[in-house]
Amino acid sequence: MLMQTIKQYIDDNKQRMLDELFELLRFPSVSADPKYAPDVLKTADYVAQKLRDAGADNVEVCPTAGYPIVYGEKIIDPSKPTVLVYGHYDVQQPDPLELWHTPPFEPTVRDGKIYARGACDDKGQFYMHVKAFELMMQTDGLPCNVKFMIEGEEEVGSNNLGIFVKANKERLKADVVLISDTSMISMEHPSLETGLRGLSYLEVEVTGPNRDLHSGVYGGAVANPATILAKMIASLHDENNHITIPGFYDDVIELTETERKELNAAPYDEAEYKEDLDIADVWGEKGYTTFERTGTRPTLEVNGIWGGYIGEGAKTVLPSKANAKISMRLVPNQTSEQITQLFTDHFLKIAPPYVKVKITPHHGGEPVVTPTDSVAYRAAQKAIAEAFSKQPIPTRGGGSIPIVALFEAELGIKTVLMGFGLDSDALHSPNEKYDIFNYYKGIETIPLFHKYFAELSK
Ligand code: BES
Ligand code: MN
Ligand code: MN
């Protein structure tokens, strides 16, 4: 497939390709909130229809115990290699709504960027694959077999995906999984992520007295669960910002000096980083750089913390309960199950006798490192080098896509993470965006991946 053919097809279909993405972005497919359930289901139908329109066969909206998985395929020749494209049509909650400059489900273009929930994560990115597939079908033809698996529960932990994968091993057989759901350093510095962190997510509840109390009548004589919770959480990091949970680092694989050098060779402008976030300084585990902290080290974060009175004005109250949602990002060879256990044991142990502590685990996911010596990785390198006129830089991603480890464990298939987002795209935040340039650039790069993957597989 020639670059000229690709560029011509995109040029001839530019507006329609964008209009279809906008239609997709208008579905509020928030998987975490049941009030959006009908919209999530409609989104799956839309994705299935678009796959059919693009030329996929055997398209099916496969039911699960949760939201359905959209499957479709084009088998041109069983003896040719097969690419399994994975993506997710569900999105995160749009809250806090008041911080959006335009409504999250009314995609709007400002300054060449599409603003909408899911613009980058992951509708804008997986839809590039649908359009690149259409492009290949309409022009020179596909050089290899393609299968699509677009799920609707990624943002809530892909709980039903494992069951689907186990039950559909034959149907999902492929030589590589291709995912665009990660970030690049910048358009000037294209990169390929070669790893993802795992996740362990829990909710804790600290209970003091059996009811909210008058803080004057009881304050000073009864432990305040909000204060206790704050202290317990604060104790989880030491003065070097190491995590204090016993055994937490036992299975962590340290990078070699060569690996660290390679990782830190990627361009990083700390002044710009701080300015973008409006922070006076960066923070993190002593002895590690920012790239190492986000890509190669495990972390512990409070995602939300509440308790007592948080309404208008003041209310003098000593709350009965305080809560927090805590997550830990994991790296090889930590496992989600073990870290959840270590956290639970430790957190119960540090609870003072004045309170009761309840811990509820949420979803998890395993960390992965993806190969850089495979045919598929080389194909991605070549495709990006051609489309961007620059060699991609390998990086380690800080986010999690639990399915990657699952594909490897269940199907024995490795993944290539060919993402086109930017960290500044505000994933999971208000005013999420995706650059129109990146959208078309992705549609341009993907057919090149298929071409080189087919060629190099011979
Ligand atoms: N696409 C993200 C993961 C991501 C973002 C990886 C940027 C690398 C760079 C994905 O949709 C996501 O948000 N995953 C969740 C995990 C899930 C179990 C809720 C995450 O990382 O918090
Ligand atoms: Mn995503
Ligand atoms: Mn996400």
Image (spheres, helix red, strand yellow):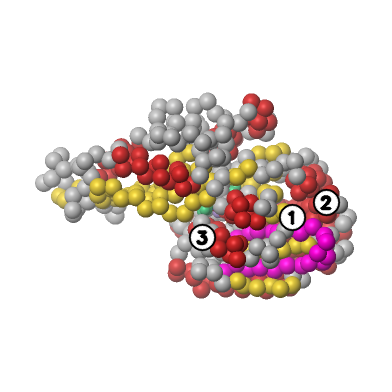
Looking at the image, residue 71 sits to the left or right of residue 80; the answer is: left
* Mark 3 surroundings within 10 Å by alpha-carbon count, few (fewer than 14), some (14 through 19), many (20 or more): some
Disc 2/disc 1 C-alpha distance (Å): 10 Å
Q: Say which residue label 1 marks.
A: 175
Q: Is residue 438 above or below residue 190?
A: below
Disc 1/disc 3 C-alpha distance (Å): 24 Å
The residue drawn where x is 52% and y is 50% is 365
Disc 3/disc 2 C-alpha distance (Å): 33 Å
Tag 3, which secondary structure?
loop
Looking at the image, residue 456 sits to the left or right of residue 147; the answer is: right
- Upstream in the sequence, badge 3 or badge 2? 3
Tag 2, which secondary structure?
helix
- Upstream in the sequence, badge 2 or badge 1? 1
Q: Which residues are magenta?
A: 68-90
Q: Picture coordinates of residue 334 (x, y %)?
A: 51, 41
Tell me if label 2 and label 1 are in contact, CB under 8 Å. yes
- Residue 435 appears in the picture as rendered: no
Badge nearest the viewer, 1 or 3: 1
- Upstream in the sequence, badge 1 or badge 3? 3
Tag 1, which secondary structure?
loop
Q: Quadrant of the N terminus?
A: bottom right
The residue drawn where x is 37% and y is 53% is 360
Q: Say which residue label 3 marks.
A: 159
Q: Picture coordinates of residue 291 (x, y %)?
A: 59, 35
* Mark 1 C-beta to ligand 1 under 8 Å: no
* Mark 2 surroundings within 10 Å by alpha-carbon count, few (fewer than 14), some (14 through 19), many (20 or more): some
Q: Picture coordinates of residue 270 (x, y %)?
A: 58, 31
Q: Say which residue label 2 marks.
A: 457
* Mark 1 surroundings within 10 Å by alpha-carbon count, few (fewer than 14), some (14 through 19), many (20 or more): many
